Image: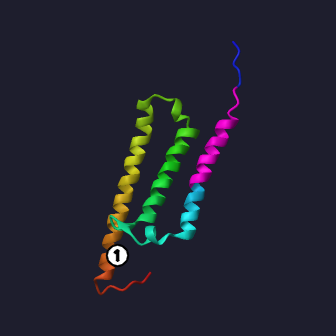
Amino acid sequence: MSHDHVSNTGRIWKVFGILSAVTIVEVILGILKPESLHMNSLMGMNLLNWIFYALTLYKAYYIVWAFMHMEGEKSSLRASVVYPVIFLVLYLLFILLTEGDYIYEVFKNSTIKWNF
């Protein structure tokens, strides 16, 4: 039995290019902070932060897809790995935003002083 080695150089460059492009977009948005995204809110957080979260989740999913070789697995295995992570990230985001907004409102509307 002979097993031929297949070069994945093209695939590696594709993954590198996609992850680099997403990172470059994140860096450019972070440096420029467009007023239209930074000053408009959606569900208590500015649109720029939502874009950062979406791009970060995309990169995380793509890293799992490419480096953990999920593209070659059955859809049920992919789902059992990816869905819990997505759920937990969204749940953590919800908790952080809810609690952060509550703490902000407590300090904003009370006599307690900001000491940090």
Tell me where the magenta segment starts and ends, as one range. 6-22
Q: Is residue 13 magenta?
A: yes
Q: Residue at x 51, y 70 (%)?
A: 33
In this rendering, is residue 101 above or below 74? below
Local secondary structure at mark 1: helix
Amino acid type, residue under disc 1 in the picture: Tyr
In this rendering, is residue 41 above or below 2? below
Q: Chief secondary structure of the magenta span?
A: helix
Question: Is residue 4 found left or right of 104 in the rendered image?
Answer: right
Front residue of 33/66: it is 33
x and y percent of residue 51 in the render?
46, 59
Q: Residue at x 37, y 68 (%)?
A: 41
Quarter of the figure that contains the N terminus: top right
What number of labels is visible?
A: 1
x and y percent of residue 93 in the render?
38, 58
Q: Residue at x 55, y 69 (%)?
A: 32
Question: Is residue 5 found left or right of 20 in the rendered image?
Answer: right
Quarter of the figure that contains the C terminus: bottom left
Question: Is residue 60 found left or right of 6 in the rendered image?
Answer: left
